[in-house]
Image (cartoon, rainbow, N blue to C red):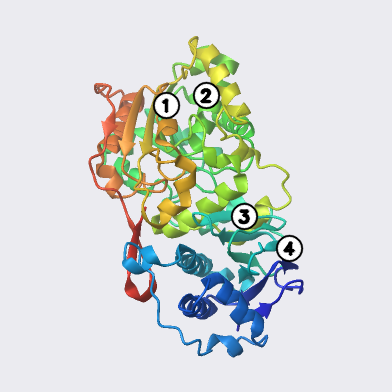
Amino acid sequence: MPTVYRRRQHIPELRGEIRGGLAVVAHSPLDIGALDQLVEKCAGLPGDPLDNVYRVVASADKSFEAWANANLKADRVDFHEGSPQFEDGDQRVWALRQSLKLSADLWRAQRNEIEELALALIVPRPGRRAMVDCDQPAFVLDYGSLRARVLTAGGRLREFGVVLFPVARSKRRNRLVEALRDRATGIALPRLERVKSADLAAKSGVVIFLHGLMSTDVGTFDALLKTLGEDPAFGDSAYLVSWPHDTLAPIDLNAEVLAELIERRLGASMLPMAFVCHSRGGLVARRTAVELLEINRKHWHPRLRGCITFGTPHDGAELAEDGNELIGKLILMRTMAKQAGLIPLIDALFAVKGQKALDGITDLCPRSDKGTFLRELKNAESRLARKAGAVPLPLFAVGGKADSTGLAGWLSHRYFSGAASDLVVPFASATPEAAENTGEAACDHFGYFTAEAMRRPSTTAAIDFLGTAILGRTKPEPKSAKSSLTMNTLTLKKTKGDTIRAT
């Protein structure tokens, strides 16, 4: 049963307190339905609906029953996107109810760890802003285009907060990479660090798959791997491997380790190599190529045949300016996109707690804004390619253009100001001028590897590029591949069976 905590009261589950407001702590996803009903009833009362929530809860007895079943004399109010009620009603109420629903979805998705989490609905006093003071790391949704972020030591909220947090301390701070892979479902490629010389016998080339931020290799590329597996040439001739790695570490460090693994596991084979990457993985591949070429250009230049990237921030991502907010958004988007897999929330929260800087995310900042890594990478590549702005290995870059309407659009609106993006990476950054070929896909950041995506011109062109690089197929005419297919959509349940479309 939910418990009410007024301002300055210690909240044991949160190991902290709320200032400037109150908190209603739910101990099960089932309790969230009652919180949603309370918000719905208060929206029908005269006055500001969020102030009404505060007043009703603050004036009630501490027990949940005192207000959960209260007769508030409110007509039932349903907020449906695009309907007169939504347009005329308070969008904060709609956003709060969606925050409760999304948090419940994320909570339920944790499966065996449901009992290790709790949720707090935080409402500020009228005319004030609430402040969370906590010792536990937390995932929070607060109003302002439904901002999703991670709190590592508390923080100020906007007009409300829905906070999901562990109820006990965790000892799993250093096992996020293993947790992501262990809980992922899908195709598990051989791991690069375990490749043996015998595995490469009779093969014509090697393709290394690199996943993105807060992700893992298992399940990420499934539809693409199935498509390649249906091609006898790839199935018989190309050796496909993956490398699960810590995406919160600096990209330079990732690249150093990967270059050493490639040298040790693949160096003696003399096989041509290519990378297939999602998101941040594309920058790891580019930096790894620099590492190898600087060590022995004569040996590696003929062998590094190409790199295909999907949604990689080649010119940076503005979302990286706030690493905790980028993590929060990725957690939420992966929860919404069922095919994108699950981020184990507790492991993710404790992985970032106590870190003074998230170097693996800061490295994604554009050169114009703290982008030291990208500036140094581009300078190193220009020297190796002997041409300013060039990349020293063939690059095929695919970017997404997602519909910015619906719930996911709310999550990204303030960052892109109408510019095309996959809701995480701007299209212009994902398809840089330095790329030999570019592709356009009508999808969000987690829609590049769906079954539908395999029929897009951008994907088929990328596969042709890979076949040319690794198998020596006839090279197709260079062109910009654009998808004419309709964007993948998710269907999210709203109140009483209504739906909204979100990328």
Distance between the alpha carbons at the discs numbered 3 and 1: 30 Å
- Under mark 1, the amino acid is Pro
Q: Amino acid type of disc 2?
A: Ala
- Left or right: residue 63 versus residue 232 is right
Residue 289 numbered tag: 2
Q: Secondary structure at mark 3?
A: strand
The residue where tag 1 is placed is 432
Which residue appears at 56% of the width and 53% of the height?
A: 328
Residue that protrudes farthest toward the top in the picture: 386
Q: Position of residue 83 (x, y in %)?
A: 31, 66
Q: As shown in the figure, which amino acid type bears the numbered disc 3?
A: Val
Secondary structure type for disc 4 = strand
Alpha-carbon span between mark 2 and mark 3: 33 Å
Bin the neighbour count of mark 1 within 10 Å (Cα to Cα): few under 14, some 14-19, many 20 and up. many
Residue 150 has which mark?
3
- Give x and y (percent) for residue 76: 40, 81
Q: Nearer the viewer, residue 318 or 166?
A: 318
* In front: label 2 or label 1: 1
Mark 3 and mark 1 residues within 8 Å of each other at the beta carbon: no
Evaluate if marks 2 and 4 touch, with contact meaning CB atoms under 8 Å apart.
Answer: no
Q: Is 175 on the left or on the right of 304, as rendered?
A: right
Say which residue appears at 64% left-offset and 53% top-offset.
175
User: Which one is in front, 116 or 91?
Assistant: 91
Which secondary structure lies at badge 2? helix
Give the alpha-carbon distance from disc 4 to disc 3, as whole Å: 12 Å
Label 2, label 4: how many angstroms apart (C-alpha)? 43 Å
Whole-percent x and y of residue 490?
A: 35, 58
Q: CA distance from mark 4 to mark 1?
A: 42 Å
What kind of residue is marked 4?
Answer: Cys
Q: Earlier in the sequence, mark 2 or mark 1?
A: 2
Is residue 374 in sight in this rendering? Answer: yes
Please determine whether, in this image, residue 133 is positioned above or below residue 33. above
